[in-house]
Amino acid sequence: MIAWTGKKTVEGIAYAADVLFLSYLAFKEFLSPARRGRSEVSKAVTRQLLLIGVDALPVVGAMALMLGLIVIIQAGLVLPQVGADAFLAHVIVVTIIRELGPLLTAFIVIWRSGTVMCTELGFMRVDQEIAALEAMGIHVIGLLVMPRMVGAIVSMVCLTVYFDLVAVIGGFVVAKIALTIPFAAYLTEIEKALSMADVLITVIKSSLFGLAIAVICCHHGLSVGSAMAEVPQQATGALLNTVAVCLILDIVVSISFYL
Amino acid sequence: MMSEAVITLDHVSASEGNQVRVDDFSLTVRRGEAVALVGSSISGKGVALQLCAGLEAPESGSVRILGVNPAAASEEEMLHLRRRVGFAFVKPALLSALNVFDNVALPLRYHAIFPEATIHDRVMARLAECGVEGLRDRFPAGLAMGDARLVAMARAMALDAEILCVDEALFGMDADELVRFRKIVENYRKQRTVTLVATFSAPTRLFAMMDRLVLIRNGRVVADCPPAEASRVADPMVRDFVTT
């Protein structure tokens, strides 16, 4: 048991070190882009922004609308019963903007794009496409990992803001059928409850989630050897680890800023 | 007068896991030569080819490619070397998201050497050289294996490589594609500007176009001779192989 625990701990540390090192290399590429391949890297970043961000708008919007509707209806019906109807805006800010917005958006991005990143790179490894890029003197981190990292971070921030807006405003518009609160009063309360710190922390959280999703999924994809069977195994590992890391990051950021 | 050596493997050994793939392997390839590395699929010729291209690092011995020792080269020197050595893998390894034209243009665009108009002309010239210019707008998923391999060769040569390494040259090629590959080899043999190193697992009439056959067994060179002399090699396996 002790040996197993020790082995797993060493493996965990090695895994974290590998992921952090890949993040460092991708950031290094971003901050000091090589003279070569700028146009190809720019095209790759644009493609990732489309795939991760723009293509996710319908599903993120639908999820946000449904979540906003549920939270607003429940809070709007229950809070007046305990004489706390003045706290509706606070409940929405805390549950949707601070916590569920970034987290659920991250889960959607993991589900839609994280698995795609991992399997795409995995199949590229199996098909020797990555070896071919290296043989042509093309920097794999610069062309494959860094664009995914930039695409995931920018998309996560934009999608989270979009999620929050749809959930808070769209959710209320739909919930208006069941509630009697005027829309203008609702918006004024939200504005009062929402601080600059909430917005900033949401941006920090979503950026960290985007970074974690891209780097962990790329790491798993690049870890595929030569067998096709390794691709789904790595994709499953990437999915589980990314969800776990996002939850841990969420707890760490929330404790650091709100406690 | 003998031309300069462009590839020198000197008593090189390399292994994969616990398995030794090449052992005390020495080979010199001169500029403009066409060399066939011949052996069974587990002979170690694929690793030898990767060592010739600087894609694999030896555990012992020394490698020099176009005057560069890959083990001691800086990142910039390696990048320059990669542009001078083209490598066509067994699998075509074309990027599935790009069409044939963009696949061949990728190294030219990435290294940003030429304007787009020049890139277009060079890509079309390479595709025509390999007999696949009609496939320029097709995506890799829709290509036959042999066509995809010829496109991969066009891409490997896109940067005007001085050395072309082709792994399992006959793999996946039908009769028509073999004719096109033969023309590529003939063209390079005429020009004498490109050094060709290719691996083969089976005897072929293409051997007659090569300057040398290097027969490999268990990671060691068992014969290194012109094709015409291979049938006179004492080793019975070599004799059987080249006369089959």
Image (cartoon, rainbow, N blue to C red):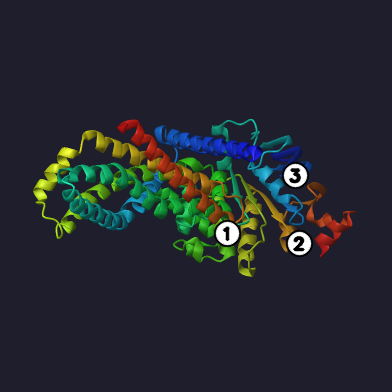
**Mark 2 or 3 closer to N-term?**
3
Looking at numbered disc 1 in the image, what kind of residue is underneath it?
A: Leu
Q: Does residue A12 appear in the picture of this structure?
A: yes
SS at mark 3 in the image:
loop
Residue extending farthest to the right is B234
Q: Nearer the viewer, mark 1 or mark 3?
A: 3
Q: Nearer the viewer, residue A110 or A139?
A: A110
Helix, strand or loop for disc 2: loop
Answer yes or no: is residue B110 visible.
no
Residue A77, quarter of the rendered image? bottom left
Tell me the quadrant of the picture where the N terminus of chain B can be found.
top right
Chain ID, mark 1: B
Between the residue at mark 1 and the residue at mark 2, the CA separation in whole angstroms equals 20 Å
Chain of the residue under label 3:
B
Q: Nearer the viewer, residue B174 or A178?
A: A178
- Secondary structure, mark 1, is helix
Q: Nearer the viewer, residue A159 or A225?
A: A159
Task: Give the image location of residue B237, x and y in percent.
Answer: 86, 58
Question: Taking B204 as reference, is B150 left or right?
Answer: left
Residue at the spot of label 1: B150
Q: Is residue B218 left or right of residue A121?
A: right
Comparing marks 2 and 3, which lies closer to the viewer? 3
Mark-to-mark CA distance, 2 and 3: 30 Å
The residue wearing badge 2 is B203
Q: Which residue is mark 3?
A: B18
Q: Residue at (50%, 66%) from the top-left corner? A: B142
Identify the residue shown where x is 44% and y is 33%.
Answer: A28
Q: Quadrant of the C terminus of chain B?
A: bottom right
- Residue B210 coordinates in the image, percent (x, y): 72, 54
**Residue at x 70% of width, y 36% of height:** B63
Look at 65% across and 33% down and name the residue there. Answer: B71
